[in-house]
Image (spheres, rainbow, N blue to C red):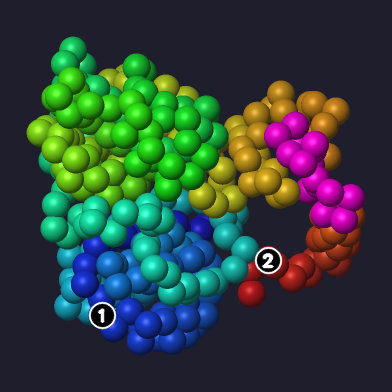
Amino acid sequence: MFYVAAFYQFANLEDYADLRPSLLALGREHGLSGTILLAQEGVNGTIAGPQAGVEAMLAHLRQHPALAKLEHKGAWATENPFHRWKVKLKREIVSFGVPAADPSELVGIYVPPQQWNQLINQPDVVVVDTRNDYEVELGTFAGAINPATTTFREFPAFVQGQLDPQQHKRVAMFCTGGIRCEKATAYLRLLGFEEVYHLQGGILKYLEEVAPEESLWEGECFVFDQRVAVDHHLRPGEYHLCFACRRPLTPADMESADYEEGISCPHCIHSLTPRRRASLAERHKQMGLAAVRAEKHLGQVQ
């Protein structure tokens, strides 16, 4: 079993670049996989490995004065959900493109999972899913607005075109783990929206704390690792991932003539160049050979 921890915190990390070497070394020491993003605005990561190793990494991060209150959401997976161990330096820990939307300065009202149903059932509350279209397809809250974005950087344009602070007095937003809502609520507050709420801990915390019989969640929740999606018990769901385009695939997608394992799916088959297709085919072949030899293929966990 692998313990999976997702975490983030907005904080002033002026020394963020100096943190990378120790995090890389500690992760290798404990056999961890996954990715940690570091930026001046904070830290964002999802990591997996032995529980003791994951907890050692979290304890190390919390030793930094700015990250002492770092929280995480944990889950178990029967297979390693990540291929590599990476610690990256970034401009933002979640790409948004609006520097003025600073969650450390201005943010919405946090709503605990146990109070979320009551909020979104109120008729004057506009509920917005801040995630991308391929995530919304797998599951969402009943009645939530789908912004139909392909990246989070498109969300500001959605707000400017579809939401009005004079008309939409109360807006409630949610995302996978909460981090995108930090910036989304900060952005709406900048634009003059009066009451802006977001689901504390995101969908994953809601699924963890709210009983299925009380839940307003419909479907599965997309996660950015090899589990692809999790159900209401945070167990891996029925979706698979296309290696070529990284889109989640339904059982119907995998029955399509356009689906070829490791190479193409109905979402990307018409956009693949012959060179890209050949490269994917060769990689899939080498991974199969490595599996037969019980070896790790380049690109799998190091």
Q: Is mark 2 on a helix, strand or loop?
A: loop
Query: Total number of numbered labels?
Result: 2
Q: How crowded is mark 1: few (under 14 residues within 10 Å), some or many (20 or more)?
A: few
Q: Where is residue 22 in the image (x, y as percent from the top left)?
A: 40, 86
Q: Where is residue 32 in the image (x, y as percent from the top left)?
A: 50, 71
Decide which of tag 2 and tag 1 comes sooner along the chain: 1
**Residue at x 75% of width, y 32% of height:** 266
Query: Which label sits on residue 14?
Result: 1
> In the displayed structure, does residue 259 sit left or right of residue 152?
right
Q: Where is residue 300 in the image (x, y as percent from the top left)?
A: 68, 66
Q: Nearer the viewer, residue 87 or 239?
A: 87
**Residue at x 17% of width, y 29% of height:** 165
User: Disc 2 to disc 1, how far (Cα)?
Assistant: 32 Å
Q: Residues within 10 Å of mark 2 (few under 14, many from 20)?
A: some
Q: Which-is-in-front pick, marks 2 and 1?
A: 1
Query: Which label sits on residue 33?
Result: none
* Residue type at tag 2: Gln
Q: Does the magenta stretch include residue 100?
A: no
> In the displayed structure, does residue 275 sit left or right of residue 101?
right
Which residues, given as a range, are shown in magenta?
261-277
* Residue type at tag 1: Glu
Query: Which label sits on residue 300?
Result: 2
**Residue at x 68% of width, y 46% of height:** 245
Q: Is mark 1 on a helix, strand or loop?
A: loop
Q: In which quarter of the image is residue 18?
A: bottom left
**Residue at x 48% of width, y 44% of height:** 151
Q: Is residue 117 visible?
A: no
- Seen from this angle, which residue lies furthest left? 194
Would you place residue 108 above or below residue 91 in this image? above
Q: In which quarter of the image is residue 56?
A: bottom left
